[in-house]
Amino acid sequence: GQQVMQIPQYQHVQEGEDFTTYCNSSTTLSNIQWYKQRPGGHPVFLIQLVKSGEVKKQKRLTFQFGEAKKNSSLHITATQTTDVGTYFCAGLFNGEYGNKLVFGAGTILRVKS
Amino acid sequence: NAGVTQTPKFQVLKTGQSMTLQCAQDMNHEYMSWYRQDPGMGLRLIHYSVGAGITDQGEVPNGYNVSRSTTEDFPLRLLSAAPSQTSVYFCASYRTKDYNEQFFGPGTRLTVL
């Protein structure tokens, strides 16, 4: 079946260090989305990437979509305590009967101050 | 504009009991989804709807029923609760078939004893 693998499962960093989470799919994605979930909260949409090789930035966050549209990454520069939470990628697969959004398992980010 | 609302926030059931989780949105979105979130497994799609009167199964539909009689409401019914259904349930709505931004409700934390 269609799966999106996300690594690492956990990341514990010192405040000010960088952080990266990666997502991989065995098949080509139509697009990929990223969400953030604060502890005890609900997922909140961050961004959507559609084009091959696309790079988007939101302040300290940099999102990349691979050339083959099978992988993506989220990089946070100089983490802050407000970055704590779980980051999910979600890949959109085009299917014969419609599109299917599949979430990765998420990366839990903890930041030590 | 409340966005996506879910009730109840918490629920404890005994094995074999049935119940309905409520979800409503006021953004006039055609598309709505139900997910369950379990530790280390990300968000898994249970059922989704592409408009009033139209629903379809997601990745883990067994033990759940849905209906969509109006654009606003998308209730999820547990027919005969089992301990394996202990989870956090999120409802989401979105505007187009390519998902774009999914808006999530605050979630319902369900425990089945």
Image (cartoon, rainbow, N blue to C red):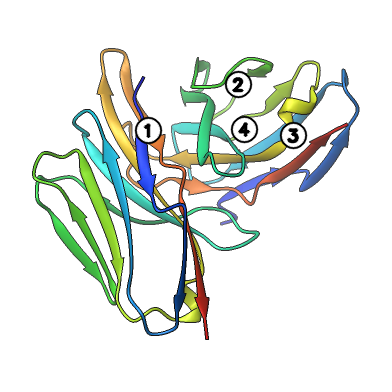
Question: How many neighbours does mark 2 have within 10 angstroms: few (below 14), some (14-19), or many (20 or more)?
Answer: few
Could you tell me which secondary element the residue under label 1 belongs to?
A: strand
Name which residue type carries label 2: Ser
Q: CA distance from mark 4 to mark 1?
A: 21 Å
Question: How many neighbours does mark 1 have within 10 angstroms: few (below 14), some (14-19), or many (20 or more)?
Answer: many
Could you tell me which secondary element the residue under label 2 belongs to?
A: loop
> On the image, numbered disc 3 is attached to which residue?
B86
Q: Is residue A18 left or right of residue B38?
A: left
> On the image, numbered disc 2 is attached to which residue?
B69
Kindly identify the residue that appears in the image at 36 percent across and 80 percent down: A17
What is the quadrant of the C terminus of chain B in the image?
A: top right
| Contact flag, marks 3 and 1 (Cβ < 8 Å) | no
| Contact flag, marks 4 and 2 (Cβ < 8 Å) | yes
Question: How many neighbours does mark 4 have within 10 angstroms: few (below 14), some (14-19), or many (20 or more)?
Answer: some
> On the image, numbered disc 1 is attached to which residue?
A101
> What mark, if any, has residue B22 been given in the picture?
none
Tag nearer the camera, 1 or 2: 1
Chain of the residue that carries numbered disc 3 in the rendered image: B
Q: CA distance from mark 2 to mark 3?
A: 27 Å
Could you tell me which secondary element the residue under label 4 belongs to?
A: loop
Q: Determine whether A54 is above or below B69 in the image.
A: below
Name which residue type carries label 4: Asp
Q: Determine whether A52 is above or below B85 in the image.
A: below
Percent position of residue B3, x then y: 55, 52
Among numbered discs 2 and 3, the one appearing first in the sequence:
2
What is the quadrant of the N terminus of chain B in the image?
A: bottom right
Question: Does any portion of residue B98 appear in the rendered image?
Answer: no
Q: Quick check: do tags 4 and 1 share a chain?
A: no
Name which residue type carries label 3: Thr
